[in-house]
Amino acid sequence: MFKKILIANRGEIACRVIKTARRMGIKTVAVYSDADKDALHVEMADEAVHIGPPAAAESYLLVDRIVDACKKTGAEAVHPGYGFLSERAAFAQALADNGIVFIGPNPRAIEAMGDKIESKKFANAAKVSTVPGFLGVIEDAAHAVKISDEIGYPVMLKASAGGGGKGMRIAYSRDEVAEGFARAKSEAKSSFGDDRVFVEKFIVNPRHVEIQVLGDKHGNVIYLGERECSIQRRNQKVIEEAPSPLLDEATRRKMGEQAVALAKAVHYDSAGTVEFVAGQDRSFYFLEMNTRLQVEHPVTELVTGIDLVEQMIRVAAGEKLAIKQSDVHLKGWAVESRIYAEDPTRNFLPSTGRLVKYRPPQEGHEDGVTIRNDTGVFEGGEISIYYDPMIAKLVTHAGDRAAAIDAQARALDAFVIDGIRHNIPFLASLMQHDRWRSGALSTGFIAEEYPEGFAPLMAQGEVAHVMAAVAAYVDHVSNERKRQITGQMRSPAHVRFDRDRVVALGKETFDITLDEGDGGLLVRFGEGHAHHLESDWVPGEPVWTGAVDGEEVAVQVRPILNGYAIAHRGVAVDARVYTREEARLVALMPEKVAADTSKSLLCPMPGLVKAINVAEGQEVKAGEPLCMVEAMKMENVLRAERDVTVKKILAKEGDSLAVDATIMEFA
């Protein structure tokens, strides 16, 4: 077994690999760019080596820097994680040429399966069902249009060396193919150093189901069940689960055996994933094979009890698989949510900045529920513009799907992040969505259910009552503590004004009366509704955890003027808690009017201006591109929302802009 390995990656996956290596008694070496000098993976590793500037092309993607780091530290093997160099056959070969072991598949398997064009050819030869498409390299946009016309619309344009949703575009017309080809090619070049793009038929209303395979260097290959990753945004997975609510045992076996046959055909010898696009009738087609560890591997680990990183290390060291296919049993259900630094209310645009507060839910196993949080950040750390915006992967495991979803919802409610925008409100609301809970999924789920994007949910119904009750509880406990600190006596029970409150959730108000008893607090609403709350919450804690009418609940609470910022079940609202007289006076206050920004184009996220498509004085029609801003490896075209005339352009190509910075003004 290896004594020391290097992790050629960053963020949560680097931390994840370090944890397993540490448990196995293997020392670890981290590599880092200027932007990551204070990163968590650097702190966790036994050693760390600086490899260059922040841009991945000048650090994490440089093979010679990784090889040099191995030589400097004496690392015997390299785990590539995912992304970056993980699917580069040349990287695996360069390591081998220098006597360093690649903890992943052999270079020939990477070449055969890692290239999406070549993998389709291998799949066809192995008689695996594949999606109709053009397997050759596309020369230019005109060639892409010609091929798309022959295949039939809609089509998917995909980077041959791609992954993680980068370099992917769906096109429904010739014009969309031409523009999508240019964007996919550019993103592929900047993300993977390979601008080849191919086209295939886009299956309408599909589901994304993938099989985890595991092989060794002795010809043994097994499959570890499936994952469903149909909840996607911009072709990037958002929520994953194992097993899939679509498959039955017969389909699972057929899909798994087909994945194993394909892996054996290319002598696959590590952990990898064979991805399929599945119809609602359980028909399926080979999509691609990822010759690396997947982001969503934790759900497979939780339902099988198998540590995939450990297996990868053991296989790379030459050990035979100790697990047979008959040993693999799926137990319970696991759900994973990807926590991203992005603003769901602004069409999920990236967000950067400092994590002023970062308090994930407690990991562990209790009452049949497991909570796991794979992360690479820490409180006080910085989310930069240079890398993927993923902050963490929150995973819950329970006896069945409904229990795993409920556990995920509670865990999301307890996940506190301040300082940047994030997608937890969206994920928390999605956990309550009837279609998600029923398992009626497709890769178009988010586009279909949120056609106008995610709008902040309003506090209403039972959720509003719970939030108002918790706000009143928190205010009451805080006031009691203040009285004790200042030496004031607690108010006598018969003095009603001390227990009467008005709670305002936005514009909706609730008349509330508080009564102590039965080991908790009874919150009575003016219309006759009542909740009994029990908690050991103390002022200063960012999450109120307790029971509401006997049901376990988590609510985020942050003090603001005259109340608390409350977040629960995807609803975020300022809850103001007043006395009756304060509420009467507040109602007389004028409302603040927001500034008019309709004549300005504001940068929707921190990013780099890649192109300005218009000039001062130019008349622009609605829908025409104004400029392009790149953030976190994604190119975002900003278009005119209506017919306008450009009055003044305040930004230029190459500028790095903050969120809401003015790019141009209109007449």
Image (cartoon, rainbow, N blue to C red):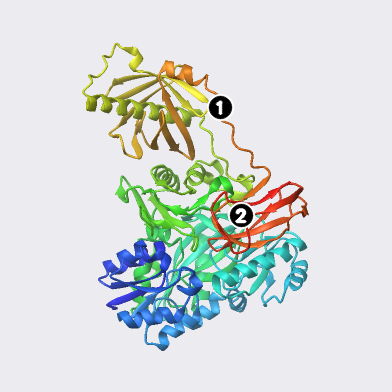
Sequence-wise, which precedes: disc 1 or disc 2? 2
Q: Nearer the viewer, residue 605 or 170?
A: 605
Question: Is residue 68 in sight in this rendering?
Answer: yes
Mark 1 neighbour class, 10 Å CA radius: few under 14, some 14 to 19, many 20 or more: few
Residue extending farthest to the left is: 487
Question: Is residue 321 in sight in this rendering?
Answer: no
Q: Nearer the viewer, residue 642 or 473?
A: 642
Hey, which quadrant is residue 367 in on the image? Answer: top left
Q: Is residue 94 left or right of residue 156?
A: left
How far across and down, in percent of the image, does residue 642 sit?
74, 46
Q: Is residue 469 left or right of residue 437?
A: left
How far across and down, in percent of the image, does residue 77 sit?
35, 79
Q: Which residue is mark 2?
A: 280
How far across and down, in percent of the image, does residue 252 sit?
50, 61
Residue extending farthest to the top is: 494
Q: Nearer the viewer, residue 362 or 195?
A: 195
As helix, strand or loop, the secondary structure at mark 2 comes to loop
Which kind of residue does numbered mark 1 sit on? Answer: Glu
Which kind of residue does numbered mark 2 sit on? Answer: Gln
How far across and down, in percent of the image, does residue 341 sit?
48, 53
Q: Which residue is mark 1?
A: 591
Identify the residue at image location x=73%, y=52%.
623
In the rendered view, would you say 396 is above or below 283? above
* 3D distance between C-alphas at marks 1 and 2: 50 Å
